[in-house]
Image (cartoon, rainbow, N blue to C red):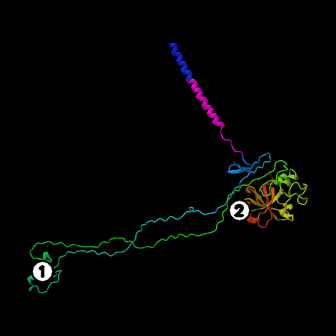
Amino acid sequence: MNSLNAKHKLKTAAFVVSTAILAAGCTSTEHHAHYYSANQAPLASTDQVVAGSMGGTGSNYQTQAGGGGSAQAQNMVIPLEQEQLVAGTQQINEGGVRLRKVVTTETVSQPVQVRRESLTVDRLPAGQGAAPQSSDTSGAQPGSAQSSAQGNPLGTPFKEGEMVINLTQEQPFVQTQIVPAGSVVVRRQTSTQPVTIQHQVRREDVQAVPIGNPQNVNISSNLTGSAQGQASNAGSSANEAAGAAPSTSGQSSGAGGSSGITQLSQLTGASDKTSLAGQSVNVSQARVQKIVGDRLIAISAPDGSSVFVRTAQPAKGLTPGQTVSVNGMVRQVPQSLSSLGLDEQTSQSLQGQQIFIDANSVMPANQ
């Protein structure tokens, strides 16, 4: 009997296990079938744009890719930002005046007339009374004596009495009253005067520098700060590929036209100075004529004229008369001076100028 029960339990357990395995297999099969039946991603078309973030400024680059084994073209867009100066006014505390009412006390003297009564008691002989009496006393009427007794209670003969005579005197008293003593007037006035403010604003730019001697790299000349002239040191072919005009024998000295401009006389002696735009400048022993602005200085040419140099960083530590070395590129003065990133007052110094030196570095000659 026990053996039958054991066999029955074994069959039941086997059935349960087989059922569980079958259920798991069905679930797994369904899961994998669902996984592999996912829709395939559509193929990108030839004009599809794939955008991604680049840099910390939220800039995007766009990529265009062709198919069918054709050549692929990729375009990268780097947006540039600049700060614009917005001038305004705000009220600040500049001090003021505190009005405090104070009360002072002083002693004032003023004379006053006061009266005081006095009393003298004296005895007089008969017939010399204080009150005027008639010379004929024999005919005095009883009524007059009675009236005298009413006015003087001690005047009744042989009658005791008492009377009080009060004395008075005046004493000074003081009181004050408020009277107008003038006033204090406070007038607030507002005046307006012109004030010129200066502030540094930032501007983004991209410098393009060829690496090695690439023959298929073209760098536009309107990129501020691009070291096209540095490519000329690697060969004249790279200099021409960068878009700079080939150097002629009249525009260079001692370097066969491949070292760019090394003398300021090459800038001032050219008949068409705008044709020098794009050429590199590597001038040493140049004397600072004046400091025009935070990023603009003027150096002296051999003929006494001024050559303006825009520095990449604020020209700190430079003084007039100092000898410096300038490394940069010749640029044509644009019609819109505001595009140079200089303040309005400094930009006015470039009015009437054809070219200027866009310097990568301005260093004292002894460094």
Kindly report which numbered mark, 2 or 1, lies closer to the viewer in this rendering: 2
Query: Residue 149 falls in which quadrant of the image?
Result: bottom left
Q: CA distance from mark 2 to mark 1?
A: 119 Å
Task: Name the residue at 11% across, 82% down.
Answer: 144
* Mark 1, residue position: 147
* Amino acid identity at mark 2: Asp
Query: Residue 243 falls in which quadrant of the image?
Result: bottom right
Q: Give 92 or 139, whichever is nearer the viewer.
A: 92
Task: Establish if 352 lies above or below 67.
Answer: below
Q: Which residues are magenta?
A: 16-43
- Within 10 Å of the Cα at label 1, are there few (<14), some (14-19), or many (20+) other Cα atoms? few
**Which secondary structure lies at badge 1?**
helix
Determine whether, in the image, residue 360 is placed left or right of residue 201: right
Q: Give 94 or 329, whichever is nearer the viewer.
A: 329
Q: Give 62 or 210, whichever is nearer the viewer.
A: 62
Q: Which mark is residue 343?
A: 2
Residue 66 place in picture, x, y as percent: 77, 48
**Which secondary structure lies at badge 2?**
loop
Count all numbered tags in the image, as a single digit: 2
Residue 133 place in picture, x, y as percent: 15, 84
Asked if residue 35 shows in the view, the reply is yes
Query: Residue 270 falls in which quadrant of the image?
Result: bottom right
* Amino acid identity at mark 1: Ser
